[in-house]
Image: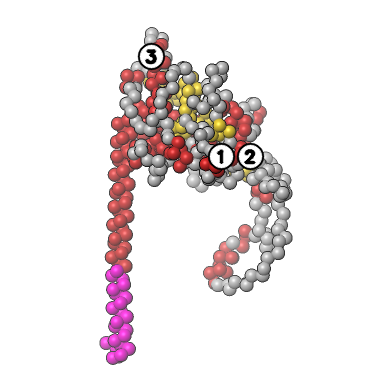
Amino acid sequence: MEITAFYPGDGSEPVSLINGYPPVNLSSHKSSLLTHSLRHGANSYISITENKDAPQSASNCRRHILEALQLRCQTDQQLVNRRFILPTQSASEQAKIKLPLEINLSDFIPSSAPNPAQQNRRAAIAIDCEMVGVRPLPLPHTSTTATRSTAKTEPQPKPQTTLRAKRKAKAKGNSKTKSGARPTQPWERSELPAGQVTNWRTKYSGANARKLAEARATGQLLPHWRDARAKLLEYMDAETVLVGHSVENDLHMLRLSHGRIVDTALQTAAAVFGVDHDVYPRAWRLKDLTARLTGNEIQTDTDNNHNGTRGGGNRPGFSNAPAPANRRGHDCIEDTLATRELALWCLLHPAGLSAWGAAMRQEMAAKVAAEQEKRRQAEEEGAEDEALAEQQEQIKELERVFGPI
């Protein structure tokens, strides 16, 4: 997990939340204070430059950006439709939200109420989490080791073997052990404890065993999602604006309910479909939005043929070797900064965001028109085929009655 603070809270009065894009004057800050001086990798990102001659200018810039973010927080209904767990929901309403299988609703806690004594509080935070595959925790009354089922079943009729089935079975021949049993999967091995990493998903997460070992050695490891959540809560409360891209997934992993959200997936979709919708037909990838709108290239290390190093220490079948330089997967800090940059870009360039939304509508309309034309042509061809088949049947009937024509 990576978190990036926009700026500390300045104690300004809260701004009423509305669902829309009212004019917030940021143009006066663009040239003098907002510069792309924050760098990470090959990309540069917006930062606020302190002006020694006019220190109040930077404070005003922060306040205006905060107001703009607050005014663009998604509505509760929009968040619920994206499977967010909100503090304002009742227990029965929360129970209706479909969560990942391994996530328990009882583990969720709400962000805390504002506390003036909280020294590290941030007014807005950008966040991104990357996930790896782990061995599921055992269900109640089940063993943590893999056992063969002894339940009796009714005898099933032996299926008929076709040539195609034989070829398919031959192609899968090496997927079974000599005895014909299915091989044990990594997460079923008795030597792997519950919670053990079974797939680092380095292609997407950027994580591997070496990085985990380095974080542990330097005291930077948060070993549990509870620890990660506790660290995040040191910097936020219920009034903090959380910025993320499809951030409901991140909050699910942290088991955190929070109501002040600027989700850039929804922020950009609103530019295409309108801010008054509670549900958007689609959302765009962070990588595509970043390249198109902010001009930054992210996730360039992802290799489609690389599945990531698989975890498990030095156990057979696992590797701690680092991924090649061009196969290190997503950079969590890069994705966090890209989300932060995208949110700020949408605030600073409302006309550009509107133009992009219009271009996307035209692009989708062109795709729909092309699909409709394709379907029409297929229907015409189908009708012609049916007419030809009918003529052939008529000829066959005439030949049966009168002989060959």
Whether residue 309 is visible = no
Residue hosting label 1: 91
Q: CA distance from mark 2 to mark 3?
A: 50 Å
Q: Main secondary structure of the magenta part?
A: helix
Q: Are marks 2 and 3 in contact (CB under 8 Å)?
A: no
Apparent side of residue 375 relative to residue 223 in the rendered image (left or right): left
Q: Is residue 180 above or below residue 84?
A: below
Give the residue type that dot 2 points to: Asn
Residue 389 part of the magenta segment? yes
Q: Position of residue 49 (x, y in %)?
A: 41, 17
Q: CA distance from mark 1 to mark 3?
A: 45 Å
Q: Position of residue 13 (x, y in %)?
A: 43, 19
Q: Earlier in the sequence, mark 1 or mark 3?
A: 3
Q: Position of residue 62 (x, y in %)?
A: 41, 20
Give the residue type that dot 3 points to: Ser
Give the residue type that dot 1 points to: Ala
Residue at 61% across, 37% down: 107
Classify residue 235 by image quadrant: top right
Q: Which residue, as the protein is rendered here, is positioned at the far left?
A: 405
Whether residue 371 is visible = yes
Residue at 32% across, 67% down: 382
Q: Which residues are magenta?
A: 383-405
Q: Secondary structure at mark 1?
A: helix
- Crowd tier of the residue under label 2, counting other residues whose Cα lies within 10 Å: few below 14, some 14–19, many 20 or above: some
Residue hosting label 3: 57
Residue at 55% across, 34% down: 256
Residue hosting label 2: 320
Residue 175 part of the magenta segment? no
Instruction: Please identify the quadrant where the N terminus is shown.
Output: top right
